[in-house]
Image: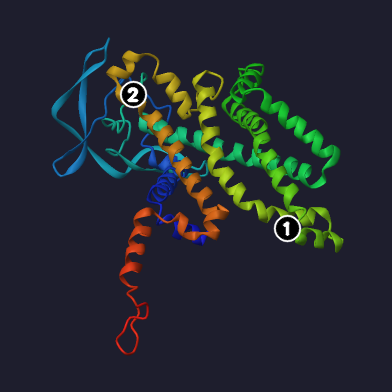
Amino acid sequence: MGKFFVYLKRRPLAFASLVFLFVFYLVMIFAEFIAPYAPVTAFPGMTYHPPNIRFAGGAFRAQEARAVNTITWKYVRVRGAYTAITFLAKGAPYRLWGVIPMERRLFGTGSGGEEAYPVFLLGADHLGRDLFSRIVYGSRISLTIGFIATAISLALAVLFGGLAGYSGGFADWAVMRAAEFFMLVPGLYLILFLRSILSSSMDSGKSYMLITLILSVVGWPGTARTIRGLVHAIKREEFVMNAQLEMIPSPVIIVRHIIPQIASLLIVSIALSVPGFILTETTLSYLGLGIVDPAVSWGSLIKRDISTLSNLKNFPWLLNPVWCLIGVTLAFNFLGDALRDFYDPYSVIFPRAGMPRRVRKKEKSSRVKKSPAEKLPGGGDRHA
């Protein structure tokens, strides 16, 4: 992995994606501290309030606005009416990670938080709730469900795929037929069917666990088939056969000799599977089969806020959860592409193939300039 970070310096898009994901997950971890308000905090009379952060007087301030039409919720800014935005502002009490009691937040207005004019960094929704705070809190479900579902799905794929490839015989036949059954039905339709036949009156915690399990059960067959093929080939290598002749137990052979050989595939599978699970959870929440109130995810934000095209036209900031979702998905894909290229055996045998074109061209021209015809001691040309 140390070599991978060196390799990332030649892949600026993948490096930027890694930094982007690091920032997003850091925000997710400290959501209570970074979000100025709780996700359920509503400000009456501020429905669809536009973003109001301004840079005035050498500092960031929240500009007040008044609704002149409560049917279309058209706002006008009040000239000269600003509320100072302070960092480490005191707000409503909360518990960081549910354990540490705190009152300070990253930024806010005044010392009373909700008593002063609120700051809407990304605007407000149809109930006057701060959209930025809801996106920050929603990232906890949308981002973690991808990793947890990927981890469970990958564990099932390694277990069943490894068992089928190493044991062969009836175990191989049974696992492959089960995998083909799950792959026969389109994944999204199967997820919708499994979710719809279960209770729709579950609370947020049960819905989260249920969706994670459904995504994991549906997502393992493709990776299991790939792992089965790799294990089936690796078990015929000499080092594995030597271990078998030494009477080393099969679980030890799998853990110590076979799994390290497919570690690169597992790493790439994680990077490429996470965005797929995130998008699937978003689809379920958008269709009303996912996360329900009072919990919030990016999919539920899209469902509740983007109800009509007129909403998008009049309140374009409601699309911000969509941009976050697209950004995270593209970042994971760019990073996964870099991991796949880095672990590609071709790039190991021919390391120059992974170098950017401009670098290869520059080095080629430098070799031409630094390789003049060698001269003989008498001044003649050796190639003459």
Q: Nearer the viewer, residue 80 or 290?
A: 290
In screen coordinates, is 323 left or right of 258? left
Disc 2 target residue: 43
Farthest front residue in view = 384
Q: Nearer the viewer, residue 137 or 192?
A: 192
Earlier in the chain: of badge 2 and badge 1, it is: 2
Res. 289 in view = yes
Query: Is 38 situated above or below 75?
Result: below
Dot 1 amino acid type: His
Give neighbour class at mark 2: few <14, some 14-19, many 20+ (Cα, 10 Å).
some
In the rendered image, residue 24, in percent from the top left (x then y), is placed at: 43, 42
In the rendered image, residue 79, in percent from the top left (x then y), is placed at: 12, 27
The residue that appears at 61% across and 28% down in the rendered structure is 211
Label 1 residue SS: helix
In the rendered image, residue 273, in percent from the top left (x then y), is placed at: 56, 38
In the rendered image, residue 80, in percent from the top left (x then y), is placed at: 12, 31
Farthest bottom residue in view = 378
Name the image quarter holding residue 370. Answer: bottom left
Number of numbered markers: 2
Name the image quarter holding residue 170. Answer: top right
Disc 1 target residue: 257
Q: Report if the CB atoms under discs 2 and 1 are less than 8 Å apart.
A: no
In screen coordinates, is 220 left or right of 288? right
Farthest top residue in view = 71
